[in-house]
Amino acid sequence: MSASEGKTIAVIGSGLIGRSWAMVFVSGGYRVKIYDNKPGHASKAIEDISEQLKELKQANMLRGSLSAEDQLALISSHEDLKGTVEGAFFIQECVFEDLQAKHSVFQAVESLVGERVVLSTSTSCLQPSQVFLPVQNKKRCIVSHPVNPPYYVRLVELVPHPDTEPSVVDSTFALMKEVGQVPVRLRREIDGFALNRVQYAIIAEAWRLVKDGIISVEDIDLVMTEGLGMRYAFIGPMETMHLNAQGLEDYLKRYREGMKRVLSSFGPVPEFSGEEVKSINQDMCDLIPSDPQHLTARRERRDRCLLGLAQLKKGLE
Ligand SMILES: NC(=O)c1ccc[n+]([C@@H]2O[C@H](COP(=O)([O-])OP(=O)(O)OC[C@H]3O[C@@H](n4cnc5c(N)ncnc54)[C@H](O)[C@@H]3O)[C@@H](O)[C@H]2O)c1
């Protein structure tokens, strides 16, 4: 019997991320009540989840110890917010990335739940102090930012509101671990959290190198997929420094000046607009046309690759 049996999580918003969270939580044995303000959307989400669980079972990639049928039986769809949050100890909000939408959800939710219920948002770019502005009791508010698709990419960034109680961060951390995600804690809020700050630094330098004619679109992507990315699925930048010399201090002794010289040659933040977009977009579309058919095929390839990588990592553990 799972320790989580009988515990209920409410997922608000049944789009891409809401569905994935629902699948992650039921894989850990939690009951999930899913709600969407568009009539019929939540029940449609369950049909889609049912298909996904069947496919995962066939691919031998189903997470958790319960069967696909048992996991599906733990999810219910709801047409009213009150019924959705009733009995839930944790609310995972997954509505549009729009401050007004999030405010109206959390205002409504706060009026319906007890003060110990954790209010968690999936926001990618909004700061917790913005998202939770209308909430009276901010001690139980937290960002749990997933990476798409969370079923294969397990990282979750936990970002507290300035008023969040440490015990709420701890219990959310424990919940995420229990359902098989890999949570990381940010000690305070910062624009972009950690993942997007690093991601945007990479995008900016890749953009500058292509815009300045140093390297092609195709080759800069190879620098990541066949170079840095090969390593980064297993060791991060800190461990890389530690292992590429006799420890981190020795690495810095050897490479500090070179790193600082290269870093100080970086250009300003790109505009990402105008002629440079036209030209870089054309190069990208020559490789992958931007019609729905080609993009869907590449997304399916991406998900197959991520599934394979997730299998490999699981095997190595
Ligand atoms: N898609 C990603 O790659 C990704 C990754 C990490 C985090 N996020 C974050 O997750 C959240 C959801 O993103 P998504 O990609 O699933 O969006 P989505 O557009 O696929 O789904 C949003 C869903 O929320 C519903 N909704 C809108 N307003 C609502 C309300 N007031 N009450 C209930 N339901 C409502 C919509 O009907 C829709 O079904 C966003 O905050 C986004 O920034 C997205």
Image (spheres, rainbow, N blue to C red):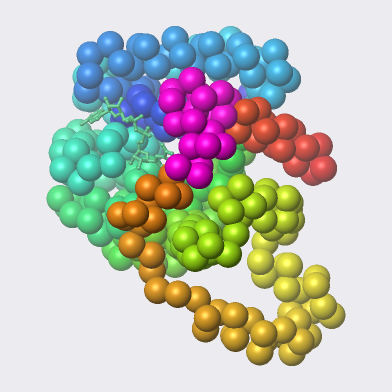
Task: Find residue 179 and report its horizontal and vertical position in percent.
Answer: 57, 36
Q: Where is the C terminus found, in terms of image quarters?
A: top right
Magenta stretch, main secondary structure, is helix
The quadrant where residue 111 appears: top left
**Magenta segment includes 118:** no
> Residue 150, image x and y in percent?
53, 37
Quadrant of the image containing the N terminus? top right
| Left or right for 145, reference 56 | left
Q: Position of residue 92 (x, y in %)?
A: 37, 37
In the image, 53 versus 286, the foreground residue is: 286
Can residue 36 be seen at all in this image of the molecule?
A: yes
Q: Position of residue 64 (x, y in %)?
A: 65, 27
Does the magenta run of residues contain 284? yes
Give the vertical position of 86 relative to 113 (above or below): above
Res 267 quadrant in image: bottom left
Q: Is residue 240 above or below residue 260?
A: above
The quarter of the picture showing ligand 1: top left
Q: Residue at x 26, y 45 (%)?
A: 115
Residue at the image point whose x is 18% and y is 54% from the top: 133
